[in-house]
Image (cartoon, rainbow, N blue to C red):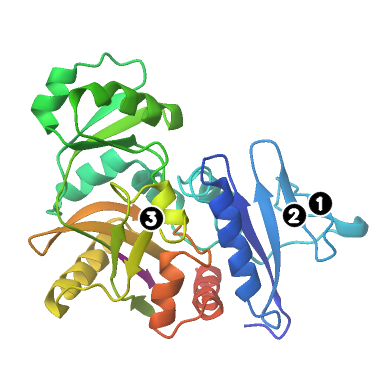
Amino acid sequence: MNSNPLNIAIVAGGDSSEYEISIKSANNILNHLNKDQFDARLVVISQQDWTVQDSDGAFYPINRHDFSWQPNGKVRHFDAVINSIHGTPGENGLLPAYFELIGLPFTGCRSFTGALTFNKYYCNQYLKQRGVNISPSILIRKDQPIDINNIIEAIGLPCFIKPNNGGSSCGTSRVNHPGEILPALERALHEDREAIIEKLLVGTEVTCGLFKAEKSSEVFPITEIVSKKEFFDYEAKYTPGMSDEITPARISAETARSVQDLSLLIYDLLDCRGVVRMDYILVNKIPWFLEVNTVPGMSPHSIVPKQASLSGLSLNDLFSILIKDAMSL
């Protein structure tokens, strides 16, 4: 690291239902970064505005040509970006593609990986071709004719219906009866133009955070998720007391190792970069892949910071590694 603090943008906000969670993640990262190492600023991005908040609380527009800003008439540039936008445009590859285009280092996955992993159906089909256990699913697009009998025949009930491109379980429903299918599709298609219908897997839900960098890597302890609702929905994820997140998970060392090894394999198959979190259902101790979160939550209640802490890694240490790695590429 340079003797002078690095100028770091923590981008947050976005244009999805995860806006508030993104802001909480970014502020938590900002509060934990070492000020001797990093001169960090929160940059809030939406379709309407890109603004940076200065240390005095004033807001300035971002010049989208080069991601610079101009406080008091003096042009300032960032050395690197921490991507903390859940959903579009941070997690689906759009914003990473912009940073790639202007040559600004950023943490997290590159644009192609972001685009692939954000599309649950195509990501699952890709991994299924490579031997990963994936629940049977079908893809429904907005304005496509719906045949409930065909859905039940192909997937069965109960099933899950969720936005194909989305996160935090926004617009996700567990469907137990045929009459619930159309309302569930309507909720999912309100969030996205595509919905994915997945066969229900019965087992233990677990999640594994990990990262790889040029000079260090870490697979964090497994977390077991026990939702107090019908499934781990938005409310269960972000409302204290609505779920138990048990780290390390109450599974055997052998099963935990299998989840960690599979996570490393998927990380490489998808060409991930930075810290990600992978979700599974254990069916008879065998992991079935649910999805990968390429911009996992970093709020005080999020899973990855807790997993990292158990591994002896603070948020400052984690992002010091990730920023250094991004700037070395």
> Which segment did they paint magenta?
207-212
Disc 2 + disc 3, Cβ < 8 Å: no
Amino acid type, callout 1: Tyr
Q: Distance between the residues labelled 2 and 1?
A: 5 Å
Who's the residue at 31% across and 42% down the image? 120
**Residue 98 visible in image:** no
| Residue 162 image offset from top left, x and y in percent | 33, 36
Compared with 97, 206 (above or below) is: below
Residue 149 to residue 312: above or below: above
Residue closest to the eye, 1 or 199: 199
Viewer-nearest residue: 324 or 209: 209
**Mark 3: which secondary structure?**
strand
Along the polypeptide, which appears first: circle 2 or circle 3? Answer: 2
Decide: few, some or many residues near mark 1? Use Cα within 10 Å; few <14, some 14-19, many ≥20: some
Asked if residue 186 is positioned above or below residue 97 in the image, the reply reads: above
* Tag 3: amino acid: Asn
- Asked which secondary structure carries label 1, the reply is strand
Q: Earlier in the sequence, mark 1 or mark 3?
A: 1
Q: Can residue 158 be seen in this view?
A: yes
Give the number of the disc on residue 52.
2
Residue 293: assigned label = 3
Q: Which mark is residue 60?
A: 1
208 magenta-colored: yes
